[in-house]
Amino acid sequence: MLSCCSLCIHHRKIRNRRERRRDTVRASPVSIGFQDYFSEIAVDYARYRPTYPDSLFDHLASLCLSRDLVWDCAAGSGQASVPLAARFRYVLASDMSHSQLSRSPRVENVCYHLAQAEVAAIRSGSVDLVAVAQALHWFPSREFFTEVLRVLKPEGIFAAWCYTLMTVDAQVDLVIHQFYYDIVGSYWPLRRRLVEEAYRSLEFPLAKLEAPEFHMEVEWSLDELLGYLGTWSAVRSYRKERGHDPRGLISEPLAEAWQPPGARKKIRWPLHALLGRGVSTRKGRDSS
C-alpha cells in the first residue's frame, strides 16, 4: 500500500537524520536564511490562532483534478494540515520549527517533517496542491516558486492565504488599531507589508485563478483576544528589545472598551487567497 512518505524523495534519509537536522536548525538559523518568530510561542500559537473555514478547503479540493497529495508548506502546528487530510489522500506537512511540528495533531495520513520551504524532499510532478497558510511572506519568493513549479503535477494547484487585521466592534477596534500601528507597528518585519497588500504585489509565476471571499470568525473572551495578540511576531520583537510586554500598555483601555465585562465577542478576520494553476502539458490545451 502506498504511504504518504513513499511519495517523498529521500524521506527515509531525512527521517534517519532528523535529530541532526534539528540541531542544525537550532544552531544556525541565520545561515539558512530562516528567521524563526514562532518556536518560542508554539504553545500559544497552537492555542490562540483562529482556525480556517471549511469553505476554503472545500474550494481548494474542488479545483484539483486529483486529490492524492498535498504539500502543506510551513505547516506550523497543523492548522491547515488536518482539514486538508480530510479531503486528500495524503498530506506532507513541512516546517522549519520542530517546536511547532511537535504540537501538531497526529493524523494517519499526515506526514510531518522538518524542511525549508525552498528545499522540498518531494518527487517532481507529484503534488496536486501546494498550500501555504499565513506564511508565504516569510519565504524567499524566487527559490520557493521554483520548487513549487518542480513538485506540482501538470495543472496542479497552488494556494496561499493570509489574514489581515480583525474587527470586533467600534470601541475595541480603536484600541487594537492603536496597538497594531502605533505601539508595535515599527516592530513588524518588512515583509509583513505583503500580508497587508493581500499578496497582490508578490511576483507570481502561475496562472492566477479567481478567489472567492473567505473570512474567519470566532467568539472569544478578552483573555483569548490578548492571548492571540501575544502570538504576533511584532509583539515578540518588541518584548525582546524593550524587556516588557506591550500588551500591558493596552490592557486597561481594552478592558474599558470590552463591554459588557466578561462578554464573549464575535471576532472576524478577512481571509485573502492567492490561487494559481500549473501549466498544462496536454497537447492543444493552450493552442486555441
Image (spheres, grey):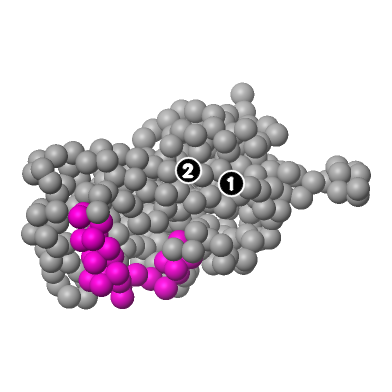
Q: At label 1, which amino acid type do we have? A: Ala
User: For the view shown, which residue lies furthest in the top direction?
Assistant: 1
Instruction: Determine if the magenta segment contains residue 193.
Output: yes
Q: Amino acid at mark 2?
A: Phe
SS for callout 2: strand
Q: Quadrant of the N terminus?
A: top right
Q: Main secondary structure of the magenta part?
A: helix
Q: Secondary structure at mark 1?
A: loop
C-alpha span from label 2 to label 1: 9 Å
Q: Which residue shows up at 65% across the image and 44% down it?
A: 157
Q: Position of residue 237 (x, y in %)?
A: 27, 69
| Marks 2 and 1 close (CB-CB < 8 Å) | yes
Question: 58 and 178: which one is in front?
Answer: 178
How many labels sit on residues? Answer: 2
Residue position for label 1: 211
Residue 99 visible, this orientation: no
Vertical placement of 230 versus 286: above or below?
A: below
Q: Which residues are magenta?
A: 171-195
Quarter of the image where one finds residue 196: bottom left
For residue 225, side relative to residue 33 (left or right):
left
Which label number is shown at residue 13?
Answer: none
Residue 250 at x, y = what percent? 14, 62
Q: Position of residue 163 (x, y in %)?
A: 42, 53
Quick one: label 2, few (<14), some, or many (20+) residues within 10 Å? some
Residue ID at (36%, 67%): 27
Residue that label 2 marks: 214
Name which residue lies at 18% across and 39% down.
Answer: 264
Asked if the stretch drawn in magenta spans residue 214, the answer is no
Q: Residue at x 90, y 44 (%)?
A: 283
